[in-house]
Image (cartoon, rainbow, N blue to C red):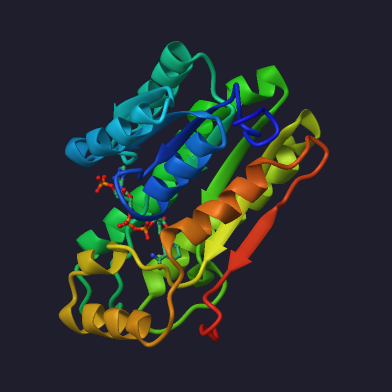
Amino acid sequence: MNEVARPLSGRVALVTGASSGIGEATAMALAEAGAAVAVGARRRDRLEGLARKLTDSGTRVLTLDLDVTDEAACRDAVARTRAELGGLDVLVNNAGVMLLGTLVGADTEDWRRMVDTNVMGLMYMTHAAIDGMLEQGSGDVVNISSTAGRTARAGAGVYNASKWAVNAFSESLRQEVTARGVRISLVEPGAVETELRSHITQPEAKAAALAHAESMRSLQPDDVARAILYVVTQPPHVAVNEVLVRPTDQER
Ligand SMILES: NC(=O)c1ccc[n+]([C@@H]2O[C@H](COP(=O)([O-])OP(=O)(O)OC[C@H]3O[C@@H](n4cnc5c(N)ncnc54)[C@H](OP(=O)(O)O)[C@@H]3O)[C@@H](O)[C@H]2O)c1
């Protein structure tokens, strides 16, 4: 493929939560567009399978044992990416959990996991990456939020709160750094066919979430990966601040 067809040639991307779903599809899309890719998550076996596929297609890959709730691990992931792949141009903060359920009677461990992963993890990764991007005067931070960051509903309170926090953090940071060449973007998918719902611990909430997803033609992970690719392949003067992408059948 020539350089025009590979707009990310010479750039380095780091994708969190790359062991499945949207993160895995995004790593593949960025690699196909020419980027070297660091892929982070906790399930090393899954990352190694992805890394083999990417390496076979000629991509430079780094696998990172990464639990984003561990700030030191986030710093290490960014440092290793810079050291081993030669830089960091695109950070996709995708790692997340959606442990839906009523607030009344909830297991508060679910709340800690959502806030620690979806909010603190995303902020640790951003903090670790941002100084280097500001020094080089360019970079993309793509934060994966959700329609749940726009529409609150009963049974999703803490997931809603975590994604609302992602939106507020992203907009604040965007204003802080945009004039220095670093773009902060928010991608907000509706229902995507991934394993996200399978980790819900409240049985009624899990059944309702699965039924909701099955009631429509959901997005596929690659549909979201294409939106992310669109964001990070704009010319330097164009910042796509926000992409809301729902299944056609999804009303809210
Ligand atoms: N699916 C949807 O309908 C939907 C809609 C809107 C937004 N989203 C958002 O999209 C993102 C990706 O979700 P998905 O749908 O692709 O679900 P998924 O297939 O379950 O992927 C979640 C990813 O996050 C990783 N992860 C979870 N906890 C982590 C931690 N502590 N440290 C590092 N990685 C962690 C998982 O890897 P390990 O378990 O291997 O660590 C996995 O790779 C999430 O932020 C989610 O909120 C999803």
How many marks do you count on the picture?
0
Residue 13 screen position, x and y as percent: 51, 31
Left or right: where 108 falls relative to 179: left
The answer to whether one can see residue 173 in this image is no
Between 215 and 2, the one nearer to me in the picture? 2
**In this view, which residue lies farthest toward the front?**
1
Between 49 and 41, the one nearer to me in the picture? 49
Using the image, determine if residue 79 lies above or below residue 31: above
Q: Residue at x 67, y 57 (%)?
A: 242
Between 156 and 138, the one nearer to me in the picture? 138
Q: Residue at x 57, y 50 (%)?
A: 228
Instruction: Give the quarter of the image for residue 3.
Output: top right
The answer to whether one can see residue 87 in this image is yes
Q: Residue at x 28, y 79 (%)?
A: 210
Using the image, determine if residue 191 lies above or below residue 137: below
Where does the N terminus fall, quadrant-wise? top right
Using the image, determine if residue 202 lies above or below residue 44: below
Residue 45 screen position, x and y as percent: 17, 37
Left or right: where 170 falls relative to 247: right
Q: Residue at x 23, y 77 (%)?
A: 206
Residue 108 screen position, x and y as percent: 23, 64
Where does the C terminus fall, quadrant-wise? bottom right
Ligand 1 quadrant assignment: bottom left
